[in-house]
């Protein structure tokens, strides 16, 4: 994992009276690269933005997106069938309403390749095995998106292209990419980012910033090894400075109490609300990653007000209202902002099926489900089918006729955003070529799930 542009680091010097800056590895490999790709790859180009919601801890798929009802099912789950899809109407009531409106689809044939939380959480974000050679230098999908869409940014777009909300320790960084493409990690707050101004005032800040630039000027003209590094640091200074004292940027990260309550008055709801506002602002963010933990329910999964319930309630209120709001906010070409924004919701793996364990919980399991919406996805569909007990993939439900892996989800995101997922960048420090989606995995190559968009 590469380091993260944490908001505290980002504004550390600014808040203390010197200057704002990005603190991240410098671009020692260069931003230009020889790039190759397969021109026949399927590029859907149906979305302009993406929101990836990582359900860290791995939710029980047979209690949520692939419901199985049995003696274990709590009465307050209130199982219902909506448009032919079994759903926990009591647990995820608001999302039930969105399912009734065909606002999302479900992939039920997902399968993980390991059962270690940190490993697969990272795998899901970088689309490869983190222990592989390229896994150690691989950027987050969001960093790839930020780099690929950089040419579409305009001068007035001042918020980083890759925004992380509530990332915490599970957030994968920019890998070997320049710090410009690192995730900007923020913990949402109704008051926004309070360090977008200097306590001594803008005039003092500007004076100190100019003094810093003057001090660095001679270093920036110094031949290697300092020239490129100092120039990159200058870019970080400029990026941070552009965000400061900008009312548009400040407002994008603020929200009112009424909206906070509507979205569930939770850390996840605040993140969904911030994602809505930042995308609506049009200030440059194209990829938002939101983390919602609390799903590692080995014990007491159905305990009242504990187990699966707190995280499920946050997901239900936050995601459902995000879908509602994005569906009515104008997007491009007569579309809604939801039409322009691909939303992917998944955990790192699934949980054991059938009866719960002696600890009244569910353990780690390979088969899992993914909720996917917007960005050209046709709602109200189920891709794939598991066996009657939910234990195995019975029908993959797509052209590759195999389970859906993390690499396929990544390829789908890239393709929907108009990015060629077969791209190979020849600027990696290993000198072997960095593939957006690895082609060396035995038996398959990550492929977009086009059935979602037909």
Image: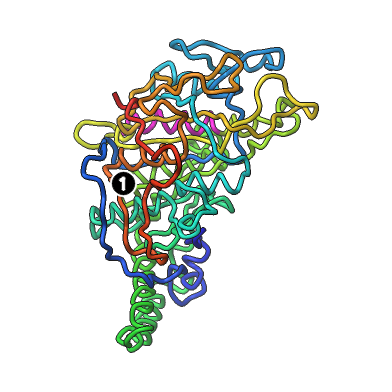
Residue at image point 47% right, 66% down: 11
Q: Quadrant of the C terminus?
A: top left
- The location of residue 300, given as percent across then percent down, is 75, 29
Residue 315, picture quadrant:
top right
Q: Main secondary structure of the magenta part?
A: helix
Residue 97 screen position, x and y as percent: 46, 19
Extent of the magenta region: 315-329
| 189 to 226, vertically: above or below | above
Q: Nearer the viewer, residue 34 or 454?
A: 34
Q: Is residue 206 above or below residue 264?
A: below
Quarter of image, res 333: top left
Disc 1: which residue: 422
Q: How many marks?
A: 1
Dividing the picture into quadrants, the one containing residue 364 is: top right
Query: Seen in the image, is 417 located left or right of residue 265?
Result: left
Please, which residue is most extreme toward the front here? 442
How far across and how far down the image is residue 240, in percent?
A: 39, 66
Residue 244 appears in the picture as rendered = no
Residue located at (32% from left, 87% from top): 223
Q: For this rendering, which residue is in front, 146 or 388?
A: 388
């Amino acid at each position: 994992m590469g380091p993260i542009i944490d908001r505290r680091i980002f504004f550390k010097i600014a808040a203390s009276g010197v200057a704002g800056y990005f603190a991240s590895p410098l671009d020692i490999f260069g931003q230009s690269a020889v790039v190759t790709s397969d021109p026949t790859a399927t590029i859907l180009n149906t979305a302009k933005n993406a929101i990836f919601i990582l359900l860290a801890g791995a939710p029980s798929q047979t209690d949520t997106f692939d419901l199985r009802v049995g003696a274990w099912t709590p009465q307050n789950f209130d199982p219902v069938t909506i448009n032919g899809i079994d759903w926990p109407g009591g647990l995820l009531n608001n999302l039930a309403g969105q399912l009734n409106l065909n606002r999302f689809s479900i992939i039920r044939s997902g399968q993980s390749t390991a059962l270690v939380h940190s490993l697969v959480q990272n795998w899901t974000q970088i689309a490869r095995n983190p222990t592989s050679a390229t896994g150690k230098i691989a950027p987050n999908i969001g960093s790839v998106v930020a780099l690929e869409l950089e040419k579409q940014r305009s001068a007035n777009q001042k918020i980083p292209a890759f925004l992380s909300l509530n990332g915490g320790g599970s957030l994968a960084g920019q890998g070997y990419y320049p710090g410009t493409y690192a995730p900007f990690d923020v913990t949402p707050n109704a008051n926004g980012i309070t360090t977008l101004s200097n306590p001594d005032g803008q005039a003092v800040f500007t004076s100190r910033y100019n003094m810093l630039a003057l001090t660095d000027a001679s270093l920036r003209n110094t031949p290697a090894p300092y020239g490129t590094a100092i120039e990159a640091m200058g870019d970080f200074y400029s990026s941070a400075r552009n965000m400061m004292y900008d009312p548009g940027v400040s407002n994008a990260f603020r929200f009112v109490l009424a909206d906070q309550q509507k979205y569930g008055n939770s850390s996840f709801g605040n993140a969904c609300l911030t994602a809505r506002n930042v995308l609506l602002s049009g200030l440059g963010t194209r990829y938002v990653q939101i983390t919602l933990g609390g799903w590692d329910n080995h014990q007491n999964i159905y305990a009242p007000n504990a187990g699966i319930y707190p995280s499920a309630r946050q997901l239900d209120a936050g995601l459902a209202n995000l879908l509602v709001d994005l569906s009515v906010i104008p997007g491009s070409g007569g579309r809604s902002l939801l039409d322009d924004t691909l939303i992917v919701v998944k955990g790192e793996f699934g949980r054991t099926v059938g009866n719960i364990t002696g600890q009244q919980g569910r353990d780690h399991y390979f088969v899992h489900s993914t909720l996917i919406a917007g960005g050209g996805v046709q709602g109200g569909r189920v891709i794939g089918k598991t066996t009657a007990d939910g234990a195995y993939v019975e029908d993959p439900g797509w052209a590759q006729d195999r389970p859906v892996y993390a690499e396929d989800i990544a390829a789908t995101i890239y393709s929907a955003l108009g990015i060629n997922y077969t791209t190979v960048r020849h600027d990696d420090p290993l000198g072997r070529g960095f593939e957006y989606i690895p082609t060396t995995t035995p038996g398959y190559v990550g492929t977009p799930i086009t059935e979602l968009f037909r």
